[in-house]
Structure formats: C-alpha cells, structure tokens
Amino acid sequence: MTAHDPRVRAAAFFSLLLANVRDALSGLQSNKQRSVLALLGISVGCASVITLLNIGAGASREAASAFSSMGSDLIAATLSAKTDELPSAVSAIPVNHLLRALPALDNAAGIAFYSADARLGRRQIQLPLVGTEPQFFEITRLKFRLGRSLSDFDTSATYTVLGANIAASLSSQHPMRIGDKVEMGNYYFTVIGILQPQGPNPLLSIDYDNAAFVSFKGLQRLRAISPSSLIASTRAPERSEATAKALQAYLERLLPQQTVDTQTPRQLLAGLQTQANVFSYLLSGMGIISLIAGGIGIMNVMIMSVTERRREIGVRLAIGARPFDIGLLFLTEALCLACLGSIAGTVLGLASSCAFLSLSGWQLNLAPVSFVVGIASSLLTGVFFGLHPAISAARLLPVRALRDA
C-alpha cells in the first residue's frame, strides 16, 4: 500500500481524529469548571428542545384522541339568523324528509339550548337544557349508567336524561334514581336515564356531563324556542366533507333567512393539527434560543482555550502540523463538548418529558423525532460556535504564536 492509497489516507485521518478526541477530553478535564458550565448550557438547550417537542406532540395526540372519540361519521350544522327576525324552526323539517333529500345521511336530529333552574328536594342548581329528538342518542352513541334514552313515545312527555355531573349535583340524601322528579320551571320532569361520564363534545359545544336532555315539546313547555343546531350521521365517513356541503346547501335553500355552517370531526382535526404545528414550531424556537445560549458558552470556552494554548499551537505548527490539523483539534474539542452536552440533555429531556406527561395525565408516548432533533441541533450548535475559534487557531503563525505565548 502506498501513502496515496485511499484506505491508508482514511486510516491516517481516523487515527488523527482519535488522537484529537483524546487531546480534547484531556483539555476539557484540565479546565473542569469552564467545561462543566459549557456542558450545562448545551445540555439545558438540548433538554429544552426534547421536552418542548414532546409537550407539543402530546398535546396534539390528546386533542386528536378527543376528536376521534366523537366518531368520524358525524356532521354538525349550526344555524344563525341573518336578521333580528325569529328563525324558522328546524323541528319543522321532518327527519324522514331530510333523509330522503340527502340519501348519504343515515340519521339526523335537531338541537336547541336553554338554561333553567332545577330543583330536587332542597337541592337547586342552574343547568343547561338540551332539547332534541330521540335520534340524537343513536347518532352520538352516548353510554348510560342507569335507565334509557328518550324514545319516539316520549316526545310529548316530561321526561329527562341527566348528565353524570348534573345527577351528582342534584343528589342530596340519596343518589339520583330512575323515577325521581326534577322541577324545572313550573313542570316536573321524570328522570328516565343517567349518562356515564362522557366529557365535552367540541363538535356541538355540548358538555354531556353537565347538561340535561329533554324532548323538543318538553323544552317548549318552558319556553318557545327553535333549534339552533342539527347533528347528523353519514353512511360514508370517508365522504363526510362532501355530505356536509350538500347538507349546508340543502338547509340554506330551505331556510334562506339563516346562515348555515357545517363542520365535521375531520375539519376540526385538520384545524387543530395546524394549530398544534404552529405550537410545536413556537416551542422549538424557544428550545433553539436555549441552544444558542449554550453555543455561546462553548464559543467562550474555546476562545479561552485557544488563548491559553498559543504556545502549544506554535510548537505543533513548528514541528510540522498543518493548519488543518490545528483547526480539526479545536473543532473536535467543541464537538466533544456538544456530544457530552447532548447526552446529558437527552437524559434530562427524557426525564422532564416523562414527568410532564405523567403529571398532566396524558398518555406516556414520547415522540422519537424530538430526540433526533434535540441531539442533531446540539451537535450543529457545537460545530457552528466552535468553528470560529478553530479557524482562529488554524490561522496563527508559528513564530507569532510562540512569541505572544
């Protein structure tokens, strides 16, 4: 093998790199205090990037799971009057008529909202009332702890279904039972069902746990009010956006005095993903700022190291070392600082991410890309901020370096 053989040159380069790593670690060990401070800065920056990216990914996953629990086949239509005139009632639209006009729909139900004082024994609270149709419970697939949902035979009766929190709030001497009568306005509504804890529905802005459900006619006993929303389920969830547009066009033709806005879980999820991405970019920017602060610390350490080792640099150049070798020596030292800092930052970021996700009650599912970005950004920071001191060392003249030392 000759000296120009690529394998010989590669072996010589790696041998030089290994020697530089040993010299770099020895130099860092001789200046422990400065090295620890530089390591602290880069490790905090790396940990910030990892933690903040995991927080952003965790928030996105939690929001996505909340929307996915609603079902991908739902469509919500919100009605608002264009003028101060009273809107036409959605309840005037027979569900069968709507389903015949739009065959892609599987079911539909109108929704009206009202707030009323409720009393059971000595317990009195103000609760949100939701006036709807029996099909509402089939569409939303609400789960019951006790009793049943409203049926087609209950439309003229004063029956109610209570959310989990409302049932607990009205309970006094004994837990709420099926058959208890809750006074709302001047009427007594018989409890026929109590829901399991469900959580809110972002698509409809209904907090199932803190609402009471009655029929339209039951709600109109308290106040003549028209439905302001409509919820429907589609037979083809993959075409829910097209079905939503068809539903919006149909309602706009039927109710020209109202503004109709339709939404699907997929549309809400797409908007949420956009917000989550912006949030992740913002958090990443905050982490990058921390890394820049750590990189400035590396630059300060390297500049001081170059100043203190001018005699060594002069001797190395005098006995045959190339400027490239000197620059590589100090760049390797900066990379060693960045590597050690990224290792410590990865451990710190992993611990802080797990702690935050556990305390927040979110699913403990870390984003692998956060570790790749954290480590890569730390190494790039070390190279970027170590490049200037390395170039400064490589440009020193042997005579001047020995004279000024």
Image: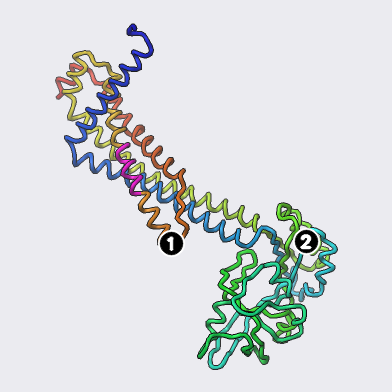
Q: Position of residue 188 (x, y in %)?
A: 66, 90
Relative vertical location of residue 299 with respect to residue 74 in this rendering, above or below:
above
**Magenta span covers which residues?**
338-348
Mark pair 1, 2: CA separation: 39 Å
Q: Position of residue 319 (x, y in %)?
A: 19, 14
Magenta-drawn stretch contains 316: no
Q: The C terminus is located in which quarter? A: top left
Judge the density around disc 2: few (<14), some (14-19), many (≥20) Cα neighbours within 10 Å.
many
Query: Which numbered dot is residue 344?
Result: none
Task: Decide which of 381, 342 is in the foreground and name it.
Answer: 342
How many numbered circles are shown?
2
Q: Which amino acid does label 2 sit on?
A: Leu
Task: Decide which of 69, 328 is in the foreground and name it.
Answer: 69
**Which SS class for mark 1?**
helix
Quarter residue 267 falls in: bottom right
Q: Position of residue 358 (x, y in %)?
A: 41, 59
Q: Which amino acid does label 1 sit on?
A: Ser
Relative vertical location of residue 254 with respect to residue 63 in this rendering, above or below:
below
**Which SS class for mark 2?**
strand
Q: Residue at x 76, y 66 (%)?
A: 107
Left or right: 72 as drawn, with respect to 386: right
Quarter residue 357 falls in: bottom left
Q: Mark 2 = which residue? A: 105
Q: Position of residue 127 (x, y in %)?
A: 59, 81
Left or right: 193 as drawn, with respect to 342: right
Q: Mark 1 = which residue? A: 360
